[in-house]
Amino acid sequence: MANNTPQIIGRADHTVSRKHISKAALKVLYTLKDAGFQAFLVGGAVRDLLLGGRPKDFDVGTDADPDQVHALFRNSRIIGRRFRLVHVRFGREIIEVATFRAASDPDLDEDRSDEEGRLLRDNMYGSIDEDVWRRDFTVNALYYNIADFSVWDYVGGVEDLKDRKLELIGEPARRLREDPVRVLRAVRFAAKLRFMPVPSLESAIAEHKELLANIPPARLFDEFLKLFQAGFARSAFDALRYYQVFRELFPDTAEGLAAHDGEDFEHFIRTALDNTDRRVEEGKPITPMFLLGVFLWWPIRARARMYVEDDGVNEVQALGRATYDCLARQQARIAIPRRFGAPLREMITMQPRFAKQRGGRALGFLEHRRFRAAYDFMLLRHVIGDVSDETAEFWTEVQTMEQAERVQAFGLSQKPANKDRPRRRRRRRKPPPSNDG
C-alpha cells in the first residue's frame, strides 16, 4: 500500500477537471504556484472529484509556511495554536491552506499519551512526502498538483476508490488511539460513499469506540452535524448502529431503541431521518434542533411520565422538566448549543397543545414562532400512533383555511373589527362657573 515516492497520474488518466473546482480555490492554488511554492488540492475534494462528485469545500496543501501564505493574501488570517492554518476568505467561501506536516516519530508518539490512551503528537512542518503519512484514510491522501494537473498517490488511494474500500494509513488501532474521532469519520465515509471498511479497520472500531467518551462534547457536536445534516442521515444512523457506535453518542436513545417498544421509536427516528434527507436534497432549510428532539423523544417521554405519576405535575410541566434533564445528560456526550436547546424545549413542551382545538388560545397557537417545528414533530408522532388521525387532520386542514373559516373551526364567533364599530360621540362638558363674580 505505502510508497516512498508517489504514483503520478497524468491529466489524461484521471477525471479531475478545473471546471469543477471553485474559482476561489483555483485562485489560491495559482497564486501559490506563481509565487514559487508547491500547491496541491488535497483531501476529500480530490476524492469526490475522482468519484464524479461536486465538492463544496476545497482544502489546499503547500510547502509555504503560514506566514508566507498570509503575506500572499490580504483576505486571509492565521488560525490555530497546535498547528497553524491559513483561512483565505472569498465572500462566504473559505479556502483552508495547510503547510505540509512532518513525519512523526513513532517511538516518541508511543511515549506521549494521555490518561485515556489517546496518543499525543506535535505537528511540525515538513514536505509532501512526509505529509501523506499524517493523513487518515488512503482515499483522503490524494493530491492534485496545479502545476501540471496530475494526481499524486502515495498509498494506493486511487485503487481503493475503484474498489470502494476504506482503509486507514498505518496500523488501525494506533491511528484510532491518536484520534478516536476517526471512528466517526470511518462510519461517515462508509455511510456517505457506500465504502466498505477493511476487516482490520472494523476490528479496530469495535475495540476503540469507547474512546469517544474522552472527546470534548463540542467536537462531537460538529461530527453530529456532518453525520446527520449532509443528506445521508438515514445511512449514517444505520452505519452507527451496525458498528455499535450510536450508543457512544446517544446512550439514552440507544436504551430506548432496545426497549420493548423500541420498534415504534425506531420507526419514528427513521421517518424523521428520511424527511431530513429529502429536505437536504430539495435545498430546504433544516435545523439540528429537530433531529436532536427526535433522538431524545423516548427518554423525555419516559421521564415525563414518571414526573406525572410521582409528583402529580401536569403534562406540560412534566415535559419541560424531563426535557431539561435529558438535555443535561446528553450534554455529557454531545454539547448542544443554547440556540438549539431552548427551541427544542419549546417544541417538546408544545406537544400537548395539539389536543386542544377550541377557543382563542388554540387559534393563537397557529401564530407561535415554534408552531411549524412543533407541528412537524406532531406529525411524526402521528406516524407511530401517539396522535390520532383526527388531531393530525385538524391541524393540517386549519392551516389552509381563510380567517373566517378558521375562527369558526376553533368554535369562535366572528366579531367585527374595532375599525368597523360605530364611534360614540363625546358630549362636551360645560366649563366650571367662574369665581370672578
Image (cartoon, grey):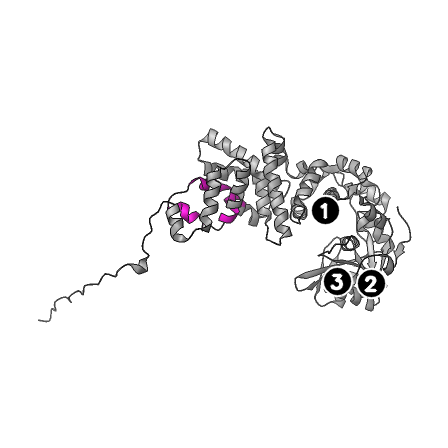
Front residue (pair 374, 118): 374
Say if residue 335 shows up in the picture: no
Q: Where residue 250 sits: x, y (%)? A: 64, 38
Residue pictured at 17% horizontal, 64% vertical: 429
Q: Main secondary structure of the magenta part?
A: helix
Q: Which residue is mark 2?
A: 146
**Which residue range is magenta in the image?**
344-373
Q: Is residue 251 above or below residue 371?
A: above
Identify residue for label 3. 25
Q: Amino acid at mark 2?
A: Ile
Give me the C-alpha separation between circle 3 and circle 2. Answer: 11 Å
Relative horizontal placement of residue 220, taking residue 387 as reference (left or right): right
Which residue is the site of mark 1? 192
Q: Position of residue 305 (x, y in %)?
A: 50, 32
Image quadrant in which you'd find residue 168:
top right
Of marks 2 and 1, the one in the foreground:
1
Which mark, by number, is residue 57? none
Secondary structure under the numbered disc 2 in the rendered image = loop
* Amino acid at dot 3: Ala
Q: Is residue 24 left or right of residue 307?
A: right
Front position in the image: 48 or 215: 48
Quadrant housing residue 33: bottom right
Q: In percent of the image, x 52 and y 37: which residue is there? A: 322
